[in-house]
Image (spheres, helix red, strand yellow):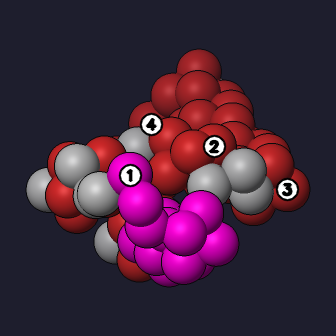
Amino acid sequence: MLRDFLKRAPRNVVEGPQRQLQRAAAALMERAGREDAAGLYRESHEWNEMARLIDRQAARSSRKAAARRSPLGRGAAARMR
């Protein structure tokens, strides 16, 4: 919803404040566990934040996959969700 609002923002909005809003929205979305926060980091040109989020999501996915492959870890994988 916030992403749609930011996309419809007037074109005369100075780039700095719009990027600040996108960056803040991305941080809020990330804290809420929303995976689409990476898109807002990209749109606001926050490459380091986007890379950090992607790395964290990849690590989490790897841990879940490893837990699912382990016979003892299947219960742990369910708890990680």
Alpha carbon of mark 4 to alpha carbon of mark 1: how far?
A: 50 Å
For the residues carrying marks 4 and 2, which lies nearer the camera in this image?
2
- Within 10 Å of the Cα at label 3, are there few (<14), some (14-19), or many (20+) other Cα atoms? few
**Residue 3 seen by the camera:** no
Label 3 SS: helix
Which of 76/12 is in front? 12
First-in-chain label (2 vs 1): 1
Residue drawn at x 31%, y 47% as measured from the top left: 7
Magenta stretch in the rendered image: 11-25
Residue 34 horizontal side relative to residue 1, left or right: right
First-in-chain label (2 vs 3): 2
**Is disc 3 in contact with disc 1, using a CB cutoff of under 8 Å?**
no
Q: Which mark is residue 48?
A: 3
**Where does label 1 land, which residue?**
11
Q: Which mark is residue 77?
A: none
Q: Position of residue 56 (x, y in %)?
A: 71, 52
First-in-chain label (3 vs 1): 1
**Is disc 3 in contact with disc 4, using a CB cutoff of under 8 Å?**
no
**Where does label 2 land, which residue?**
42
Residue 33 horizontal side relative to residue 43, left or right: left
**Where does label 4 land, which residue?**
74
Residue 24: say if magenta.
yes
Residue 60: say if magenta.
no
Give the quarter of the image for residue 49.
bottom right
The disc labelled 4 sits on which kind of residue?
Arg
